[in-house]
Image: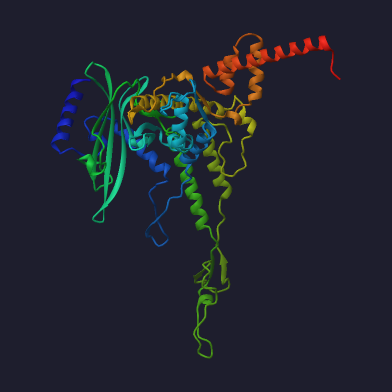
Amino acid sequence: MDLIQRIKNLFKRGGYALSGQMLKTINDHPKVNIDPAELARIERNMRQYAGDYPKVEYINSDGELRERDYMPLNMRKLSADVLAGLVFNEQCSVVVSDADEKDTNNTFHSANDYIQHVFQHNRFIKNLADYLEPTFALGGLTVRPYVDQSTGEMEFSWALANAFYPLRSNSNGISEGVMKSVTTKIENDKTIYYTLLEFHEWAKGENNENVYLITNELYKSNNKAEIGKRVPLSELHEGLQEKTPIRKLTRTNFNYLKPSGFNNINPHSPLGLGIADNSISTLTKINDTHDQFWWEIKMGQRTVFVSDQMLSTIPDEAGNPPKQVFDPDVNVYKSAHMGDGKEPVKDVTSDIRTEQYISAINQSLRTLEMELKLSVGTFSFDGQSVKTATEVVSENSLTYRTRNDHVYEVEQFIKGLVISTLELAKATTWKGEPLFNGEIPTAEHIGVDFDDGVFQDRAALLDFYGKAKTFGVIPTVEIIQRVFKVPKDTAEQWVKEIRAEEMGMVASEMDNQANQRLFGNEE
């Protein structure tokens, strides 16, 4: 760190202390130093993902300034939804290789049993399927396990890209960070915003050992745009400790998932990019074209000018009140002075340029497909261009290759979360017993099956690997791992069981042949 940066940090810390710990933004905190452009990018992504755009101003025919709603085609959300559905589904399964045992005190020894219990309790597979969409749209997702001391259950806390900020990182990922959660309360008919900042850092213990330290800070504000002034934790979270040290952890308690790819917008940032962050100009063209198309449809309703004499009303001969010539609910007819009255009715409706707009939107969608590395025909505004199943399944499909890149990131994320959960469970005591006291598995002992049936023909894979095995280029254990997505220990166990069954069948066949030689064939 250079001298100028150190001086800045000193002033920053001093201002933080002297101001009574007032924070306008997360960057005002002395521990946080994130490029403001990254924060602005994430907030922009949030607005676009929510379809939050400013109103459109225009001048009407009377020269008056008016406003109307902007009508975008929310491709940031749609593209993220499509990719999330391709990458992950609720049929995904996670298996940990270990001895499947429990003791009489109901303390888990089996890592697989414990993980299945925790995932089922937290509905992890369903929640991850839901959270992948905003992950791809915004650029990141953070999940951390924690223990509910009232029940002894392991819970998961989820944070989107706008609620997690890195503190320290290296080429292996983010090693320290802060998670933000906002809670609202009504006091004296006013909305109060409480922001809890949860810092995850590494510190040195008494014996120079690495200690994982979680620090909680609570802030209060009546302005949604500001974090506010620091207040005691007890004001909102009774019993929550300000500092919680955790020993014997080998990795961060939180796990950060980002879409595949390098952050080319800010190469020095450890944060991920939304899949459409390099397609802002294309998204703008699609939204503007769709908005203009919608407005042309609205303004293109039938309009007929009729002579003002036809819309004039006069009392009848009996003096009864005048009646309108046309239905009062009809807005098609507009009164106008038609001159000599030879053409009392004139249709001035203009044709809507439907084909031109659809063609323009589809052309922009082709550009978006190229930028997102998806196969041609993934998106279509008119429904005429539909990608076939063969194109999706084919390993040469661009969509298939892009999907595989993201699958790898999700797989590593799940494995990291499994290890973090087991480490925390082993380090946590509840009612005098650790929540888990078995062995902590390594990543290679954790299998994640994404249920690729839609994308991979497993019969074809078995045929391919079977031929490879014939030539002696790949062992059976490796084939089972690749086709069925199971850990190495499970694959080895399957091979043993298969061989045992084969030996049993051989022994049985030999007995049958011996009986036939002695007693002949039974009638």
Question: Quick check: 394 left or right of 74?
Answer: right
The outermost residue toward the right is 523
Rendered location of residue 119, percent (x, y): 45, 33
Residue at image point 63% right, 33% down: 389
Would you identify the image quadrant in which residue 395 lies? Answer: top right
Q: Seen from this angle, which residue lies furthest left?
A: 18
If the image is split into quadrants, where does the N terminus sit? top left
Eyeballing the image, is 313 above or below 67?
below
How was the colour assigned to the protein in this rendering? rainbow
Q: Quadrant of residue 452?
A: top right
Q: Is residue 347 visible?
A: yes
Q: Is residue 306 above or below residue 137?
A: below
The residue at the point 41 percent across, 36 percent down is 138
**Horizontally, is 233 left or right of 440 in the view?**
left
Q: Nearer the viewer, residue 402 or 365?
A: 402
Q: In the rendering, at what x and y percent does residue 232 appear? A: 20, 40
Q: Position of residue 175 (x, y in %)?
A: 32, 23
Which percent across, then down, holds residue 381? 56, 43
Quadrant that contains the C terminus: top right
Q: Is residue 118 left or right of residue 469?
A: left
Query: Front-most of 58 and 405?
Result: 405
Q: Is the residue 234 above or below the residue 419 in the image?
A: below
Nearest the eye: 302 or 195: 195
- Number of marks in the image? 0
* Outermost residue to the bottom: 318
Residue 260: tell me if it is visible.
Answer: no
